[in-house]
Image: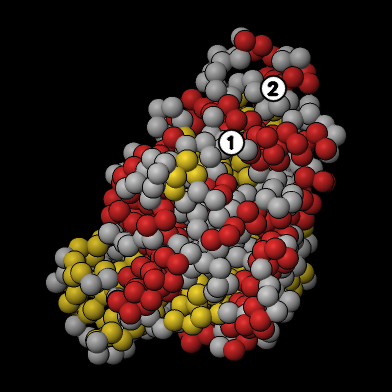
Amino acid sequence: MNNNAYLDELESKSIYIIREAYWEYRNNLAALWSMGKDSTALVHLLRKAFFGEVPIPVIHIDTTFKFRQIYEFRDRYTKEWNLNLIIARNDIALKENMSPEKGRFNCCTILKTEALKQAIHRHTLKALLVAIRRDEHAIRAKERYFSLRDKEFKWDYQNQPLELWTEYYKTEAEAGTHVRVHPLLHWREIDIWRYIKRERLPVINLYFAKKGKRYRSIGCECCCQPIESKADAIDKIIKELRITQIPERAGRAQDKEKEYMMQKLRSLGYM
Amino acid sequence: MQDYLKIVVTGEVDSGKSTLIGRFLYEMGSLSEGVIEEIENVSQRLGGDLEFAYLLDSLEEERRNQLTIDTTQAFCKTKKGKQFIFIDVPGHKELLKNMLCGSSYADIAILVVDVQKSIEGQTKRHAFILKFLGIEQIIVVLNKMDSVDFNENIFEKVKGNIIEFLKKIGLQPKHFIPISAKQGEGLLRKSKKMSWYKGLPLAEALNVYMKKERNGDLRFPIQDIYTIDNERIAVGKIVSGKIKRGEKVIILPLNKEYNVKKIKIFNENKSIAKAPESIGLILEEMGDLRRGQIICKIRPPQIKTEILTKIFCVRPFNIKESLKFRCTTQASYAQIKQIKGIWDSASLEPKPKEGILEETDIAEAIIAMEPPLVVEGFERLNSLGRFILKDSKDICAVGIIL
């Protein structure tokens, strides 16, 4: 199997899942878009699944601490791709000066998870498309394609429903609960970059090395550290990923504040 | 070569499934920096030797209790460039649905047997499920050889028992490999401690396996109908075969024939598409198309009101209950009309043919469906030959059509 056929298969599976989610939830479905490489690939898959006209809103969870480039990218491509953008921001907490200085765990929970809760409520959403992948983190590797969050947003990871052949899922969600749908679960980091290259997708320039450093994963400026790298172009990133031993989220502070941090954040509704 | 072979690692509780995968990744050099360090720290704090299973068992509860709760996946690449995805699954009977979930993604399976314990309940059940899901390429590893001093006679005896059981369910593994996952013996290289073993070490045995091909007759279950630029498009994923622009296709159960006008992917028109592509399809006539119809060409499948099936129960349910039936994008109501037999999936002993089907029971049953659906025998085409049954809450059984 060559590179192309392999990417086609990953893509086809994701499009199938996106279309299943749209069939199930129709106008109560939205996608999360952080403008990072994965969720931008997700938005592209949405454009492909719906022949260029994305029928569902995309949500940006805005902590206001994001890199400047992220906001520029968002505004440019929202327009270019004719997206219906929802900005989810916890204004009350921001007025009370919530920031990473008050503890990263707290900050992530209040400015991301809580802001998302408000948006779900406001827009009566039943399901969210989220661009997480199994190879990002051992906790994310445990996920299902369709994953229920209860009224408190909790993920019952000890009792997940049966899913079979990427074809049968538990899609039902009682009032007040919602479903996270993960169409990119089976992609690896390197696959995403190969896909970005093949499909000529735009990416934020923070991913490319400047002065020997680049970001491998981006989010809030204050909580992201660049890695040592000379990869200043997509081909070089792909080459780097083929040999690196450094994990993708090495530069993300919120994963590492304490042990099982990611599990705890996720069990409370973090992505 | 970019594609990866998906390998599910199955077997009884504590046979060493997660340890096997963890050790394999470690030996292959597939682990990130920091990961080994993290595992060392956790192992030390939980008071034990370096525990390779923690690489897979990422949940706090899993590490504390030393058991796998849910299925997970890990990537790995050999020096020859062959790529694997290992799928870890729990061994406990109570967690069987998680095992089923993980196994449904696999191309091949490793069945791990603790050489001190021979073939036990869950090993038998897992073997049955693998066969049931159509995974017939199986490698058996006899683990914990270190605990029997790498003794050849014990290996041969246990191997004999396993062969005997697997024969009953129609499985004939090509490889029986003695290993010690904990010590890394028999994984990548021939073990010096077991020079009597003449077969391949695990990594080399895995190297020769291939994925199943997806040829065959055209089957395209319609997933949804979209209207884009005032044009109706039937979307879905081709589960087998090819479709070409201009050819005539049959739509079941409508039993109508229409010409293919356009095959669309994004903003591109294609002249041909094949499995497993997700496409959009415009036929000369679109008015009566909807989700759940099957588009095909030659040798069309049959429209059935009753089917003979084998089902595997994942949640207890009353056989008189009215159920929902799903096969690809088709949905119907179903009722079990007749039970031909019920068996325990580990012992394969028959059980009384009435009342409640218990979790992990197997049954042969005639199921009636309303409305009728388009199906095929599982042996002929997996995707239209397998189905799920749902009660009011969730999936209660998985089935194949005989």
Near-viewer residue (A215 or B101)? A215
Asked if residue A165 shows in the view, the reply is no
- Label 1 marks which chain's residue? B
Residue drawn at x 14%, y 72% is B246
Dot 2 crowding, Cα within 10 Å, few <14, some 14–19, many 20+: few
Give the number of the disc on residue B302. none
Q: Quickly name the residue at label 1.
A: B33
Image quadrant occupied by the C terminus of chain A? bottom right
Near-viewer residue (A65 or A127)? A65
Q: What is the distance, in whole Å, between disc 1 and disc 2 at their CAs?
A: 21 Å
Amino acid on which the number 1 mark rests in the picture:
Glu
Name of the residue lying farthest toward the right: B47
Amino acid on which the number 2 mark rests in the picture:
Gln
Badges 1 and 2: C-beta atoms under 8 Å apart?
Answer: no
Scheme by which the image is coloured: secondary structure
Mark 1 / mark 2, whichever is N-terminal: 1
SS at badge 2:
loop
- Label 2 marks which chain's residue? B
Residue drawn at x 41%, y 53% is A207
Q: Is residue B79 above or below residue B269?
A: above
Total marks in image: 2
Image quadrant occupied by the N terminus of chain A? top left
Residue drawn at x 34%, y 55% is A195
Residue drawn at x 70%, y 63% is A101
Residue B79 rendering spot, x and y as whole percentages: 43, 27
Q: Quickly name the residue at label 2.
A: B183
Q: Is residue A62 left or right of residue A47?
A: right
